[in-house]
Image: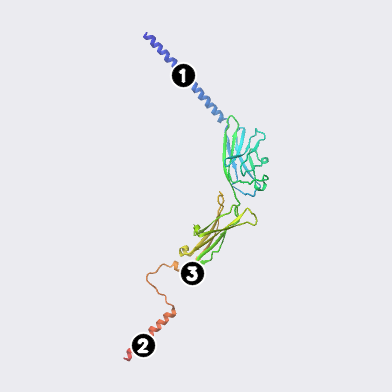
Amino acid sequence: MKHSRRASGSSATSIASDSCTRCEGMCLTKMRLALLFLCSLFGSGASIQLLRLDVPKMADPRWEKVVLKCEYDLGGEDLYSVKWYKDGAEFFRFMPGSTPAGRNFSVDGVYVDLNRSDSKQVTLLGQANNRRGGKVNLMGSYGCEVSSEGPSFLTIYGEANMSVAIPPKERPNLRGLRPSYEAGETLQAECSSAASYPPARLVFILNGKEVNQMLTRELPISSSTEDTMMSSSRLSLTMRLERQHFPGGTLTLGCQSTLPGIVGARSLERTETATLAASNQRLAQEPPRSGCVVNLPSTLLATVCCFLLRSFNYGILTFSYV
């Protein structure tokens, strides 16, 4: 009886062992199949790359059109769709399997020229070429999304910002600064920018530091005679000058213009100098002297000397007479 129990137990153990072996084999087989599928997926070139996203950093609002380009490599896969977004909202889609292949979606300020848009580029109409009557607003963040066909259905995405501006053609003008000043005098200057869009932001720079805005005043903006879209900014400065404003006897005043909110726009600056008046400059540069020194005019000094000399001679004569 005992022997039969052992045999029975041994048989059960053998069956369980065979069952586990079969389960492990099935699991390994499934893992191998999954690995083979992944290897075939990636080994067959099922990967796509975004080669270049061409979005102008700065667009002129007077342009008739703006072309955005999206270059990619599908790695042997078929194209499923190309989608364009502005600030997260889709405005154009190209699907070669659809009719028509290109389709636009309503997004404020964006107008697509479907005849000049395809799987590689999208053409946006400028204000001058927009016949639909809406206001064009090209400023924003643009994204390109490319997807491949099944079974991989891989997707890539790229994004770039575009600003809208007309930069000034020259440095700002600085007027009113005199060649020299005395301590205690008032400096009055005016800065004006060249025409731009949007209007330039102006600041005064005194000896390398931005002047407190409490000392400046914005003047009315003047429109350009050549283009009503462009305008010039003006800023005035009024401040009392002290000797500390003339380090080394010289004051440096600059006017700087920048385009607010425009990424990549460089600032322009014009700088001029003024000196401390000669008498004040000498006093400012000379070290303080110890004691008290009295400078008497030469005429007064000569009179005093004559008086003392006469008094001395008179005293001698009087002494001799006595």
- Dot 2 falls on a residue whose secondary structure is helix
Q: Position of residue 261 (x, y in %)?
A: 55, 49
- Dot 3 falls on a residue whose secondary structure is helix
Answer left or right for 187 relative to 222: left
- The residues bearing labels 3 and 2 have C-alpha atoms spaced at a distance of 46 Å
Q: Earlier in the sequence, mark 2 or mark 1?
A: 1
* Residue that badge 3 annotates: 278
- Position of the N terminus, as image quadrant, is top left
**Which of the numbered marks, if any, corresponds to residue 314?**
2
**Which of the numbered marks, if any, corresponds to residue 21?**
1
Note whether 309 is above or below 72 in the view shown.
below
- The residues bearing labels 2 and 1 have C-alpha atoms spaced at a distance of 144 Å
Q: Quadrant of residue 268?
A: bottom right
Characterize the local packing of mark 1: few (<14), some (14-19) or many (20 or more) Cα atoms within 10 angstroms: few
Q: Nearer the viewer, residue 176 or 239?
A: 239
Residue contact at pointers 3 and 2, CB within 8 angstroms: no
Q: Earlier in the sequence, mark 3 or mark 2?
A: 3
User: As drawn, which residue projects farthest toward the bottom?
Assistant: 321
Q: Earlier in the sequence, mark 1 or mark 3?
A: 1
Q: Is residue 33 visible?
A: yes
User: What amino acid is found at the position of numbered circle 3 in the picture?
Assistant: Ala
- Position of the C terminus, as image quadrant, is bottom left
